[in-house]
Amino acid sequence: RNGAVVFDVDGTLVDSERDGHRTAFNAAFSAAGLPYHWDVETYGRLLQMTGGRRRIATFLRRQSHSHDEAEELAAILHADKTARFRTMVEQGAIPPRPGIRALLSELSATGMTLAVATTGTRMWVEPLLDNLFGRGRFACVVTGTEVPTLKPDPGVYLRVLDGIGLPPNRAIAVEDSVNGLRAAQGAGLRCLVVTNHYTRGQDFTGALGVLDRFLVPDVAMLLRHHLLPS
Ligand code: XBP
Ligand code: MG
């Protein structure tokens, strides 16, 4: 076996945060009659907290909701946000990052195992992967729904390694953010970072490389170089 490449979803396989999740969160606030709106810049700061439900709860506590009230309201709002985001996915509103489709084809052709490690919610992750990349494209998909602690905790990566049956030195993670990088490193994986407008400038110490886009021949060559026996 030629090793595995484990992809993050949000910000890595898809450009999903600014015009995707953010607008779904805002629609949920508005439908609940709440006066909150996350603009592009505010949302960038809130992204430090992974997981949509936790992101809402943290925000509500800062708006002086009590702890219990914030938790309860966050659960309700996040369920609505998830349904809305799933609809966006089904409508094709969430695009793959440029180059990603070609990269996946190239890696598959080299005999590499493809997998996914995300803190996102399974209810939208599954249709998104199926619609954009075809059902069964990834040998193993672990989402935030299956793990008790989210990135930067390494749990999601440990479960992927278990699922594909490879040791961490036979896999490379591809991430867009510092939280993802730390999660991958915590599970013992090397990690290539491909940044986007929200994550550029974060501390990527220890990354295998830091790029700002998927230049397919370069990325494929780098992954082959580090995974295949020379
Ligand atoms: C992604 C997340 C997710 C999404 C929203 O982080 O933190 O919470 O922002 O999705 P990563 P949900 O790319 O590191 O996996 O609302 O389903 O949580
Ligand atoms: Mg990400």
Image (spheres, helix red, strand yellow):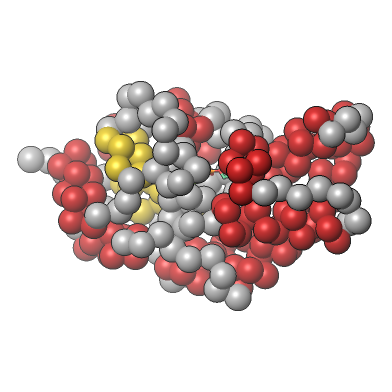
Q: Position of residue 3 (x, y in %)?
A: 26, 45
Q: Is residue 129 left or right of residue 103?
A: right
How many numbered marks does the figure carry? Answer: 0
Position of 58 compared to 43: left or right?
right
The answer to whether residue 97 shows anywhere in this view is yes
Q: Which of these two is toward me, 183 or 148?
A: 183
Q: Image point 51% across, 50% down: which residue?
A: 10
**135 and 207: which one is in front?**
207
Q: Position of residue 8 (x, y in %)?
A: 46, 47
Residue at (28, 59) in percent of width and height:
103
Residue 161 lies, in percent from the top left, at 42, 39
Residue 225 in which image quadrant: top left
Of all residues, the one furthest to the bottom in this rendering is: 91
Q: Is residue 25 left or right of residue 14?
A: right
Instruction: Decide: is 154 above or below 175.
Output: above
Mark yes or no: residue 161 visible.
Answer: no
Horizontal and vertical percent position of residue 107: 25, 57
Residue lying at 79% horizontally and 57% vertically, measured from the top left? 28
Q: Is residue 151 above or below residue 212?
A: above
Image position of 127 with respect to 116: above or below: below
Tell me the residue at 19%/38% (across/down): 226
Judge by depth and name the residue closer to the eye, 53 or 3.
Answer: 53
Residue with the most extreme left position: 230
Q: Which of the image's four quarters has the C terminus?
A: top left
